[in-house]
Image (spheres, helix red, strand yellow):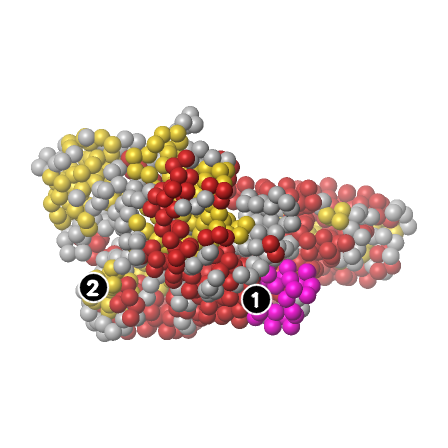
């Protein structure tokens, strides 16, 4: 049997089905589009759901793909076995009401036996136990002997998920030979050992399951197949596991070289090698699709995978950062199939390096916190770390439970695993709740799902601001209707529209739809499945009926202002890459008539100098009066011209390219002005971080920027009047006022200090004894924390030996300080524990060392109660 590389197998598969009149579609991004039921794409058919459900018309009724997928359900087993992984590629061929069982089976067999030349005697198939039709095709049409066809039950060979489309499956198995057998006499297809490997699943979606559990034949049945590329490569290269496949082995070997270890010599090291190999593949592909590390959602998945890989690098003894170097291998072996990896190379290195740096910082913090937990357990003579604390280490500091357990075991301690698992389950439930529930295939039930999938709207707004068209459909919130009357809120669908629907960051147009007797105010425009433009609003007067001819007119002034902001956004994007570096990538945008907002990947706040330079460069490009042109071309031609594509966007064969002279060229479906000089002026009004590694700039253009300058002028004028000075002298006046304020504050501090020193003698009269130890617990008014600490130091010197607890309130805030002399610490007194108990009473928290601690609170009225508690706490400490 011939040996094929993983990249070669992918190419062979896609080309084979292209020869069967299938449209080859590029892999969709790992971030699901318009699917609230999925966190990440986890199967080849997942991005094609709208075609299966009829919400969208597919570009062709026959499609083939190789889809990037992430599954984390078995993440705890990754590395521990050679089977499990989080990232994989799924080959698939799909039919949307075109061919069915006979062709799907025939082509699958042809590809397996003729193209890959797998010997027929090493192949077996399974069918659903009630699917006589599939068995007959395999046996009589293909010629597979009945002894090699296995009928299996619903659990194995019937695909369904709740209600909706479903159907029987047929799977193809490959016999890897006796060396992979479990040795049992009954070892055959279906055995749990590694001899008979199922590598291709053909799903025949021929039924519709209703709420009552009844199955109805579909008028147009579908084909959905899935074959794991890595698993296929394992077979064709006759290797033990996915980690031995050519492209993945290259990465595995790089891990071994980094760690200076040999694979298959030590099980524990093998676990780490496999885990790092798998996780860096996932991280690289996820980051290339615009996912950024965060503490929730898919960003949390990326962070978790990256930090697990980083920790296992430490376990292998790898010194310093290493993950970005490994991502280079991922890029090299996969860039031909996924060119976006190479295009985003610098960006990926930056993301991975910064996150690895952060992990190195947090794991050190975690070790310190765990040591604190251990000290507390020993002090209280406990032996079990709470599940809550173990989960905090895991969730906040990237400490997996096994690492916590390993460290505790060295101290003869353990973890409350049940409580940890409970906290973990609560988090998973929160994550599930954060994703809106949807029914079968992620199709939310709303009125738009009732529309004919073949219906679509033609956008004519690039060249028209008003247009005459025909009403195709009218709808309320819940139903398709034949008419809307005065006062009704609803949606109008037409054949052609000049209204821009919200997309690509640009907000929708507003305006009116009219007849001779009716007026509809358009408040929102959305694209719904299948390129249907939903004009949402209210009937102001008259009646609108299906089939009626209407005039659609947008608000031209708003459109013009929005177009200026959108063109300015393109210029800003290019300038940011020039000023900050090529790692800058768009991470989101919002363009409306009154402002623009641009989110981008960058890892530190912009300096005033950088912001000034960005603003200056953008205005420079505007003043160059560059002509803005748009053209529709192929995606390949657009990329050859240097057009920038955006993360998470799915582009068809033809794309719209927006060029601003020779300066900026991007793929964009939005509306733009004809020349940069129409933007007039550009002003940044804010820059801030909105997530890890993501910054946001908000800016104004044209008349909005002019209005902003006018508002600033008025503000300066008002402040000048208030300070009784001229605008030109405003800075000097402010500096003078600040100097005066600083002098007054210094005088105030000196007065406070003198008052505190004068109070020392009076406070010492409050000293009492607790079990032979001096205790001074006193309240002093209007002292800040620094003053309170200074007073405590003076009193500590005066009493020589003992415990001091001071409390003060200022501006409705409480400050607490506890100090214990070293000799009393040896007797069992602990300032940190005293402060914890008292701070709780005043509605605050804090802690510290045995000899000094401080805290804050928000209930000044409870200070006396808190001070009374001190004697009781100290008594308990001294009696131990």
Q: Is residue 843 above or below residue 323?
A: above
Q: Nearer the viewer, residue 357 or 731?
A: 357
> Dot 2: within a 10 Å radius of its alpha carbon, few (fewer than 14), some, or many (20 or more) residues?
few
In the rendered image, residue 503 lying in the magenta stretch gets the answer no
Residue 382's x, y, as percent? 80, 47
Residue that carries the numbered disc 2 in the rendered image: 631
Q: Secondary structure at mark 1?
A: helix
Query: Which portion, as a residue range, is magenta?
Result: 251-280
Give the mark nearer the N terminus: 1 vs 2. 1
Q: Judge whether residue 855 can be spotted in this image.
A: no
Residue 636: quadrant of the picture = bottom left
Q: Judge whether residue 464 can be spotted in this image.
A: yes
Which residue appears farthest toward the left when viewing the image? 516
Residue 439's x, y, as percent? 41, 37
> Dot 1: within a 10 Å radius of its alpha carbon, few (fewer than 14), some, or many (20 or more) residues?
many
Q: Is residue 398 left or right of residue 91?
A: right
Q: Nearer the viewer, residue 429 or 206?
A: 206
Q: Residue placed at 25% from the left, 38% from the top?
A: 452
Q: Secondary structure at mark 2?
A: strand
Label the magenta part by its dominant secondary structure. Answer: helix
Q: Residue placed at 69% from the left, 45% from the top?
A: 417
Residue that carries the numbered disc 1 in the rendered image: 252
Q: Is residue 128 left or right of residue 429?
A: left
Q: Is residue 542 above or below residue 858?
A: above
Q: Is residue 730 above or below residue 211?
A: below
């Amino acid at each position: 049997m011939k040996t094929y590389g993983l990249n070669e197998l992918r190419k062979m598969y896609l080309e084979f089905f292209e020869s069967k009149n299938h449209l080859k579609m590029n892999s969709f991004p790992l971030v699901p589009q318009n699917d609230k039921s999925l966190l990440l794409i986890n199967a080849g058919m997942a991005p094609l759901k709208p075609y299966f459900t009829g919400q969208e018309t597919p570009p062709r009724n026959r499609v083939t793909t190789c889809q990037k997928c992430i599954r984390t359900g078995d993440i705890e087993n990754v590395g521990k076995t050679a089977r499990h992984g989080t990232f994989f590629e799924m080959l698939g061929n799909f039919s949307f009401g075109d061919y069915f069982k006979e062709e799907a089976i025939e082509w699958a067999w042809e590809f397996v036996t003729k193209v890959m030349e797998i010997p027929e005697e090493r192949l077996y198939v399974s069918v659903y136990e009630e699917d006589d039709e599939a068995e007959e095709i395999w046996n009589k049409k293909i010629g597979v002997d009945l002894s090699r066809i296995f009928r299996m039950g619903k659990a194995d060979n019937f695909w369904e998920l709740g209600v909706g489309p479903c159907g029987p499956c047929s799977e193809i198995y490959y016999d890897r030979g006796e060396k992979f057998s479990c040795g049992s006499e009954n070892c055959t297809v279906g055995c749990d050992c590694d001899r008979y490997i199922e590598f291709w699943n053909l799903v025949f979606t021929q039924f519709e399951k209703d709420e009552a559990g009844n199955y109805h034949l579909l008028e147009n049945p579908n084909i959905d197949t899935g074959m794991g590329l890595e698993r296929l490569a394992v077979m064709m290269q006759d290797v033990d596991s996915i980690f031995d496949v050519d492209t993945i082995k290259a990465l595995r070997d790089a891990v071994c070289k980094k760690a200076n270890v040999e694979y298959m010599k030590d099980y524990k090291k093998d676990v780490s090698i496999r885990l790092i190999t798998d996780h860096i593949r996932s991280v690289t592909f996820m980051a290339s699709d615009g996912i950024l590390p965060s503490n929730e959602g898919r960003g949390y998945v990326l962070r978790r995978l990256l930090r697990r890989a980083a920790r296992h690098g430490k376990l292998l003894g790898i010194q310093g950062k290493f993950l970005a170097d490994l991502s280079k291998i991922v890029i090299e072996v996969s860039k031909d199939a996924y060119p976006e990896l190479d295009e985003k190379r610098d960006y990926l290195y930056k993301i991975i390096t910064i996150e690895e740096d952060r992990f190195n910082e947090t794991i050190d913090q975690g070790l310190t916190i765990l040591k604190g937990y251990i000290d507390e357990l020993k002090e209280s003579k406990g032996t079990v770390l709470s599940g809550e604390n173990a989960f905090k280490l895991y969730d906040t500091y990237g400490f997996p439970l096994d690492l916590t357990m390993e460290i505790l075991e060295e101290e003869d301690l353990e973890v409350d695993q049940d409580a940890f698992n409970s906290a973990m389950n609560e988090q998973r439930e929160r994550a599930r709740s954060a994703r809106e529930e949807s029914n079968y295939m992620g199709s939310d039930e709303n009125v738009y799902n009732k529309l004919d999938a073949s219906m679509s709207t033609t956008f004519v707004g690039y060249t028209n601001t008003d247009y005459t068209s025909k009403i195709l459909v009218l709808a309320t919130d819940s139903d398709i209707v034949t008419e809307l009357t005065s006062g009704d809120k609803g949606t109008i669908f037409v054949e052609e529209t000049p209204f821009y629907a919200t997309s690509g960051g640009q907000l929708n147009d507003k305006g009116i739809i009219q007849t001779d007797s009716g007026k509809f105010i358009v408040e929102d425009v959305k694209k719904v499945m299948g390129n249907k433009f939903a004009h949402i609003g209210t009937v102001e007067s008259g009646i609108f009926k299906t089939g009626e001819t209407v005039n659609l007119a947008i608000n031209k002034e708003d459109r013009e202002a929005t177009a200026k902001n959108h063109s300015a956004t393109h210029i800003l994007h290019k300038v940011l890459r020039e000023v900050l570096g090529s790692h800058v990538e768009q991470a989101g945008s919002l363009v409306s008539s009154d402002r623009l907002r641009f989110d981008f990947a960058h890892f530190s706040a912009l300096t005033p100098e950088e912001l000034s330079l960005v603003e200056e460069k953008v205005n420079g490009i505007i003043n160059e009066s560059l002509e803005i042109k748009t053209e529709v071309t192929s995606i390949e031609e657009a990329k050859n011209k240097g057009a920038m594509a955006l993360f998470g966007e799915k582009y068809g064969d033809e794309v719209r390219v927006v060029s601003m002279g020779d300066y900026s060229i991007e793929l964009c479906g939005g509306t733009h002005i004809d020349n940069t000089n129409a933007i007039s002026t550009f002003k940044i009004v804010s820059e801030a971080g909105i997530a890890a590694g993501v910054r946001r700039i908000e800016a104004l253009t044209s008349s909005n920027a002019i209005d902003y300058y006018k508002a600033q002028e008025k503000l300066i004028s008002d402040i000048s009047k208030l300070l009784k000075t001229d605008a030109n002298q405003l800075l000097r006046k402010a500096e003078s006022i600040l100097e005066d304020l600083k002098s007054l504050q210094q005088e105030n501090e000196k007065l406070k200090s003198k008052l505190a020193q004068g109070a020392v003698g009076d406070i010492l009269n409050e000293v009492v004894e607790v079990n032979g130890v001096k205790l001074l617990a006193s309240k002093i008014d209007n002292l800040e924390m620094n003053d309170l600490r200074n007073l405590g130091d003076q009193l500590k010197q005066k009493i020589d030996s003992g415990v001091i607890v001071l409390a003060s309130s200022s501006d409705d805030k409480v400050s607490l300080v506890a100090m214990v002399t070293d000799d009393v610490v040896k007797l069992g007194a602990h300032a940190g524990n005293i402060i914890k108990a008292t701070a709780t009473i005043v509605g605050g928290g804090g802690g510290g060392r045995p000899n000094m601690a401080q805290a804050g609170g928000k209930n000044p009225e409870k200070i006396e109660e808190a001070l009374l508690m001190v004697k009781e706490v100290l008594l308990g400490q001294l009696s131990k």
